[in-house]
Image (tube, rainbow, N blue to C red):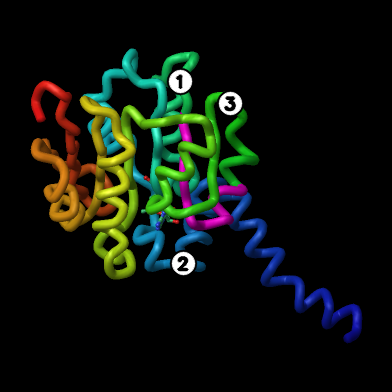
Amino acid sequence: MTSTELAREALPNRIKRRIKRMLGAWGVFFEGFLRHPVMVGSIIPSSRFTIAKMLGPVKWEECKLFVEYGPGVGTFCRPVLERLRRDGALIVIDTNPLYIDYLRATISDSRFTAVLGSAADVEDIIRAHGHSHADYVLSGLPFSTLPDGLGPKIAEATWSVLRPGGAFLVYQFSAKAREFMARHFKRIDSGFEPLNVLPCRLFWGWKEDAGEA
Ligand SMILES: C[S@@+](CC[C@H](N)C(=O)[O-])C[C@H]1O[C@@H](n2cnc3c(N)ncnc32)[C@H](O)[C@@H]1O
Protein backbone atom coordinates (compact mmCIF):
# COMPACT_ATOMS: atom_id res chain seq x y z
CA MET A 1 0.00 0.00 0.00
CA THR A 2 1.39 3.43 -0.96
CA SER A 3 1.69 6.26 1.55
CA THR A 4 -1.21 8.03 -0.20
CA GLU A 5 -3.40 4.93 0.18
CA LEU A 6 -2.42 4.67 3.83
CA ALA A 7 -3.37 8.29 4.40
CA ARG A 8 -6.73 7.68 2.64
CA GLU A 9 -7.35 4.51 4.67
CA ALA A 10 -6.80 6.35 7.93
CA LEU A 11 -9.06 9.30 7.11
CA PRO A 12 -12.42 7.83 8.27
CA ASN A 13 -10.82 6.82 11.58
CA ARG A 14 -9.32 10.29 11.99
CA ILE A 15 -12.70 11.90 11.32
CA LYS A 16 -14.40 9.49 13.73
CA ARG A 17 -11.86 10.32 16.45
CA ARG A 18 -12.29 14.07 15.88
CA ILE A 19 -16.11 13.87 16.06
CA LYS A 20 -15.83 11.75 19.23
CA ARG A 21 -13.53 14.31 20.88
CA MET A 22 -15.90 17.15 19.93
CA LEU A 23 -18.94 15.34 21.30
CA GLY A 24 -17.18 14.12 24.46
CA ALA A 25 -19.30 11.81 26.64
CA TRP A 26 -22.21 11.95 24.16
CA GLY A 27 -19.86 10.72 21.42
CA VAL A 28 -18.76 7.76 23.54
CA PHE A 29 -22.40 6.99 24.40
CA PHE A 30 -23.39 7.10 20.73
CA GLU A 31 -20.50 4.84 19.73
CA GLY A 32 -21.61 2.36 22.43
CA PHE A 33 -25.12 2.49 20.95
CA LEU A 34 -23.81 1.84 17.43
CA ARG A 35 -21.88 -1.22 18.66
CA HIS A 36 -24.72 -2.69 20.80
CA PRO A 37 -28.03 -0.94 19.89
CA VAL A 38 -30.29 -3.52 21.58
CA MET A 39 -28.37 -3.56 24.87
CA VAL A 40 -28.06 0.24 25.05
CA GLY A 41 -31.60 1.01 23.86
CA SER A 42 -31.19 4.81 23.59
CA ILE A 43 -29.09 7.23 21.56
CA ILE A 44 -28.93 10.06 24.11
CA PRO A 45 -28.13 9.97 27.86
CA SER A 46 -30.89 10.80 30.41
CA SER A 47 -31.78 14.45 31.06
CA ARG A 48 -31.03 16.39 34.27
CA PHE A 49 -34.80 16.46 34.92
CA THR A 50 -34.95 12.65 34.92
CA ILE A 51 -31.92 12.50 37.22
CA ALA A 52 -33.39 14.97 39.76
CA LYS A 53 -36.81 13.28 39.80
CA MET A 54 -35.43 9.72 40.02
CA LEU A 55 -33.03 10.49 42.88
CA GLY A 56 -35.53 12.71 44.76
CA PRO A 57 -36.84 10.08 47.22
CA VAL A 58 -33.39 8.69 48.18
CA LYS A 59 -32.51 9.13 51.87
CA TRP A 60 -28.82 9.85 51.36
CA GLU A 61 -27.91 9.88 55.05
CA GLU A 62 -29.01 6.20 55.24
CA CYS A 63 -27.22 5.15 52.05
CA LYS A 64 -23.92 3.32 52.44
CA LEU A 65 -24.02 1.35 49.20
CA PHE A 66 -25.65 2.65 46.02
CA VAL A 67 -25.58 0.32 43.00
CA GLU A 68 -26.29 1.36 39.42
CA TYR A 69 -27.05 -0.95 36.48
CA GLY A 70 -26.27 0.34 32.97
CA PRO A 71 -24.45 3.59 33.86
CA GLY A 72 -23.45 4.22 30.22
CA VAL A 73 -21.08 7.20 30.25
CA GLY A 74 -21.94 8.11 33.86
CA THR A 75 -24.93 10.45 33.47
CA PHE A 76 -26.17 9.44 36.93
CA CYS A 77 -22.76 8.63 38.49
CA ARG A 78 -21.67 12.22 39.07
CA PRO A 79 -25.01 13.38 40.59
CA VAL A 80 -25.03 10.27 42.81
CA LEU A 81 -21.46 10.96 43.99
CA GLU A 82 -22.37 14.59 44.72
CA ARG A 83 -25.17 13.42 47.06
CA LEU A 84 -23.51 10.31 48.54
CA ARG A 85 -22.06 10.45 52.06
CA ARG A 86 -18.29 10.55 52.44
CA ASP A 87 -18.08 6.95 53.69
CA GLY A 88 -20.57 5.66 51.10
CA ALA A 89 -19.83 3.57 48.01
CA LEU A 90 -21.14 3.58 44.44
CA ILE A 91 -20.76 0.38 42.42
CA VAL A 92 -21.82 0.56 38.78
CA ILE A 93 -22.26 -2.48 36.53
CA ASP A 94 -22.34 -2.41 32.73
CA THR A 95 -21.89 -5.08 30.05
CA ASN A 96 -20.29 -2.63 27.59
CA PRO A 97 -16.47 -2.46 27.97
CA LEU A 98 -16.36 0.86 26.09
CA TYR A 99 -18.44 2.51 28.84
CA ILE A 100 -16.57 0.84 31.72
CA ASP A 101 -13.20 1.94 30.30
CA TYR A 102 -14.54 5.47 29.85
CA LEU A 103 -15.90 5.63 33.42
CA ARG A 104 -12.66 4.31 34.91
CA ALA A 105 -10.70 6.91 32.92
CA THR A 106 -12.91 9.87 33.76
CA ILE A 107 -14.22 9.40 37.32
CA SER A 108 -11.59 9.46 40.04
CA ASP A 109 -13.38 9.16 43.36
CA SER A 110 -12.35 6.62 46.00
CA ARG A 111 -16.05 5.78 46.59
CA PHE A 112 -16.55 4.76 42.95
CA THR A 113 -16.12 1.28 41.40
CA ALA A 114 -16.99 0.41 37.80
CA VAL A 115 -17.51 -3.29 37.10
CA LEU A 116 -17.69 -4.95 33.68
CA GLY A 117 -20.46 -7.52 34.10
CA SER A 118 -24.18 -8.15 34.10
CA ALA A 119 -26.75 -6.77 36.53
CA ALA A 120 -27.98 -10.37 36.87
CA ASP A 121 -24.80 -11.09 38.88
CA VAL A 122 -25.26 -8.20 41.30
CA GLU A 123 -25.17 -10.43 44.41
CA ASP A 124 -21.76 -11.91 43.56
CA ILE A 125 -20.44 -8.52 42.45
CA ILE A 126 -21.26 -6.63 45.64
CA ARG A 127 -20.03 -9.54 47.79
CA ALA A 128 -16.72 -9.50 45.89
CA HIS A 129 -16.42 -5.84 46.89
CA GLY A 130 -17.05 -6.52 50.59
CA HIS A 131 -20.77 -5.67 50.89
CA SER A 132 -23.60 -7.88 52.12
CA HIS A 133 -26.47 -5.72 50.84
CA ALA A 134 -27.28 -2.53 48.92
CA ASP A 135 -29.37 0.38 50.19
CA TYR A 136 -30.49 1.53 46.73
CA VAL A 137 -30.23 0.05 43.26
CA LEU A 138 -30.78 2.26 40.20
CA SER A 139 -31.47 0.84 36.77
CA GLY A 140 -31.21 2.41 33.34
CA LEU A 141 -31.48 -0.98 31.62
CA PRO A 142 -33.61 -1.28 28.48
CA PHE A 143 -35.88 -3.98 30.01
CA SER A 144 -38.09 -4.23 26.91
CA THR A 145 -35.21 -5.31 24.67
CA LEU A 146 -33.19 -7.48 27.09
CA PRO A 147 -32.87 -11.19 26.17
CA ASP A 148 -35.81 -13.37 27.30
CA GLY A 149 -35.80 -14.17 31.00
CA LEU A 150 -33.11 -11.65 31.92
CA GLY A 151 -35.46 -8.92 33.19
CA PRO A 152 -37.22 -11.19 35.75
CA LYS A 153 -33.83 -12.59 36.83
CA ILE A 154 -32.46 -9.08 37.43
CA ALA A 155 -35.59 -8.00 39.35
CA GLU A 156 -35.30 -11.10 41.60
CA ALA A 157 -31.56 -10.62 42.21
CA THR A 158 -32.18 -6.95 43.01
CA TRP A 159 -34.86 -7.76 45.56
CA SER A 160 -32.48 -10.23 47.25
CA VAL A 161 -29.60 -7.78 47.38
CA LEU A 162 -31.57 -4.86 48.85
CA ARG A 163 -31.82 -4.32 52.58
CA PRO A 164 -35.32 -4.01 54.06
CA GLY A 165 -36.38 -0.37 53.63
CA GLY A 166 -34.17 -0.01 50.53
CA ALA A 167 -35.46 0.70 47.03
CA PHE A 168 -35.11 -0.30 43.37
CA LEU A 169 -35.16 2.86 41.22
CA VAL A 170 -36.02 2.27 37.57
CA TYR A 171 -36.42 4.61 34.58
CA GLN A 172 -37.53 3.34 31.20
CA PHE A 173 -39.34 4.42 28.04
CA SER A 174 -42.02 1.75 28.61
CA ALA A 175 -43.66 0.21 31.69
CA LYS A 176 -42.17 -3.24 31.02
CA ALA A 177 -39.92 -3.19 34.09
CA ARG A 178 -42.91 -2.67 36.37
CA GLU A 179 -44.19 -6.18 35.50
CA PHE A 180 -40.95 -7.76 36.73
CA MET A 181 -40.74 -5.51 39.78
CA ALA A 182 -44.33 -6.28 40.84
CA ARG A 183 -43.45 -9.97 41.39
CA HIS A 184 -41.27 -8.94 44.35
CA PHE A 185 -42.01 -5.37 45.40
CA LYS A 186 -45.41 -4.86 47.07
CA ARG A 187 -45.15 -1.08 47.00
CA ILE A 188 -44.20 0.55 43.70
CA ASP A 189 -44.45 4.33 43.32
CA SER A 190 -44.69 5.66 39.75
CA GLY A 191 -43.71 8.87 37.98
CA PHE A 192 -43.26 10.33 34.50
CA GLU A 193 -40.64 12.69 33.08
CA PRO A 194 -41.61 14.41 29.81
CA LEU A 195 -38.33 16.36 29.52
CA ASN A 196 -36.23 13.42 28.37
CA VAL A 197 -35.42 11.92 24.97
CA LEU A 198 -37.72 9.92 24.88
CA PRO A 199 -40.11 10.90 27.73
CA CYS A 200 -39.74 8.19 30.35
CA ARG A 201 -41.53 6.29 33.09
CA LEU A 202 -40.06 6.18 36.58
CA PHE A 203 -40.64 3.53 39.24
CA TRP A 204 -39.54 3.22 42.85
CA GLY A 205 -39.98 -0.32 44.23
CA TRP A 206 -39.64 -0.36 48.02
CA LYS A 207 -38.52 -3.48 49.85
CA GLU A 208 -40.67 -3.66 52.97
CA ASP A 209 -39.10 -3.23 56.40
CA ALA A 210 -39.14 -6.34 58.62
CA GLY A 211 -42.17 -4.89 60.50
CA GLU A 212 -44.17 -4.37 57.27
CA ALA A 213 -43.55 -7.84 55.74
C1 LIG B 1 -30.22 3.31 28.05
S1 LIG B 1 -28.55 2.99 28.50
C2 LIG B 1 -28.53 3.90 30.05
C3 LIG B 1 -27.50 4.97 30.04
C4 LIG B 1 -27.40 5.90 31.25
N1 LIG B 1 -27.66 5.25 32.50
C5 LIG B 1 -28.22 7.15 31.10
O1 LIG B 1 -29.09 7.39 31.94
O2 LIG B 1 -27.99 7.94 30.20
C6 LIG B 1 -28.58 1.28 29.00
C7 LIG B 1 -27.28 0.72 29.54
O3 LIG B 1 -27.49 -0.60 30.03
C8 LIG B 1 -26.33 -1.40 29.73
N2 LIG B 1 -26.73 -2.83 29.85
C9 LIG B 1 -27.50 -3.57 29.02
N3 LIG B 1 -27.69 -4.80 29.52
C10 LIG B 1 -27.04 -4.84 30.73
C11 LIG B 1 -26.90 -5.84 31.76
N4 LIG B 1 -27.44 -7.06 31.64
N5 LIG B 1 -26.18 -5.52 32.88
C12 LIG B 1 -25.61 -4.28 33.01
N6 LIG B 1 -25.72 -3.31 32.06
C13 LIG B 1 -26.42 -3.58 30.94
C14 LIG B 1 -25.92 -0.91 28.35
O4 LIG B 1 -24.59 -1.25 28.04
C15 LIG B 1 -26.13 0.61 28.52
O5 LIG B 1 -25.00 1.23 29.07
Q: State left or right for residue 204 relative to residue 67.
A: left
Q: Which region shows up in magenta?
A: 90-101
Evaluate if marks 3 and 2 touch, with contact meaning CB atoms under 8 Å apart. Answer: no
Evaluate if marks 2 and 1 touch, with contact meaning CB atoms under 8 Å apart. Answer: no
Q: Which residue is mark 2?
A: 36
Q: Is the C-beta of the residue carrying label 2 under 8 Å from the nearest atom of ligand 1?
A: yes
Q: CA distance from mark 3 to mark 1?
A: 11 Å
Judged by depth in the image, the label closer to the viewer, 3 or 1, is: 1
- Where residue 163 appears, as percent x and y from the top left, is 28, 29
Q: Nearer the viewer, residue 51 or 57?
A: 57
Query: Is 93 in the magenta?
Result: yes
Which amino acid type is marked by label 1? Gly
Q: CA distance from mark 3 to mark 2?
A: 28 Å
Q: Looking at the image, is mark 3 or mark 1 earlier in the sequence? A: 1
- Does dot 1 land on a helix, a strand or a loop? loop
Q: Residues within 10 Å of mark 2 (few under 14, many from 20)?
A: few
Q: State left or right for residue 2 relative to residue 167.
A: right
Q: Which residue is mark 3?
A: 109
Q: Nearer the viewer, residue 128 or 98?
A: 128
